[in-house]
Amino acid sequence: MRLTMRTNLAMRTLMTCAANPGRTLTKNDIARACNASEHHVAQVVHALGQSGFVNTQRGRSGGLWLARPPEAIRVGDVFRRFEASVPFAECFAGDANTCPLTAACRLREALAAALDAFYMALDRMTLADLVGCNDALGKLLAMAPARTPACIRAA
């Protein structure tokens, strides 16, 4: 299994926004932090905005920021938004399925169960779980890590 570049970039974008609370970030900021092209970031930001994960504002002082608190953004929801259009295997492709084994194959059932387990694991994780108390990520995103009292007690 391999994630699409768009899903990977969507998660990087969301983590960058979450690691920089209270800031409006530009596509250029995201592109630099995520080592991606601004064109790809623009496409992903558009999809994230349409899905309600980020707010965007156009113009000279525009940019993007999280539309919801990091605790309210489930990783599984992001993955479903970006991976749903890519069938895991040909037999999941509906009308595009040309596999001659579909009628008798039991592998599809096993794959469906594995995918369900994969998404269930991601549904248990929020953006806050990825970013909270993660000083190393804060340093990678070139922002001073925000230390909350819970982080200080845990350290």
Image (cartoon, grey):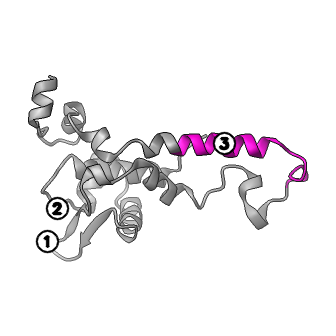
**Residue displayed at 26% across by 63% down:** 67
Quadrant of the rendered image containing residue 93: bottom right
- In this orientation, which residue lies closer to the viewer: 52 or 43? 52
Going by the numbered disc 2, the residue's amino acid type is Thr
Q: Which residues are magenta?
A: 99-119
Say whether disc 1 or disc 3 marks the residue closer to the N-terminus: 1
One can see residue 101 in this view: yes
Q: Name the element at disc 3.
A: helix
Which residue, given by chain and number where applicable, does mark 3 sit on?
A: 113
Say whether disc 2 or disc 1 marks the residue closer to the N-terminus: 2
**Residue displayed at 75% across by 45% down:** 109
Classify residue 107 as left or right of residue 15. right
Which residue, given by chain and number where applicable, does mark 1 sit on?
A: 61
**Residue displayed at 90% across by 48% down:** 104
**Number of the front mark, 3 or 2:** 3
Q: Are marks 1 and 3 in contact (CB under 8 Å)?
A: no
Relative image position of residue 124 (x, y in whole percent): 42, 42
**Number of the front mark, 2 or 1:** 2
For label 3, the crowd category at 10 Å Cα-Cα, with few meaning under 14, some 14 to 19 and many 20 or more, is: few
Which residue, given by chain and number where applicable, does mark 2 sit on?
A: 24
**Residue displayed at 28% across by 61% down:** 27
Would residue 114 be counted in the magenta stretch? yes
> Where is 18 relative to 139, above or below?
below
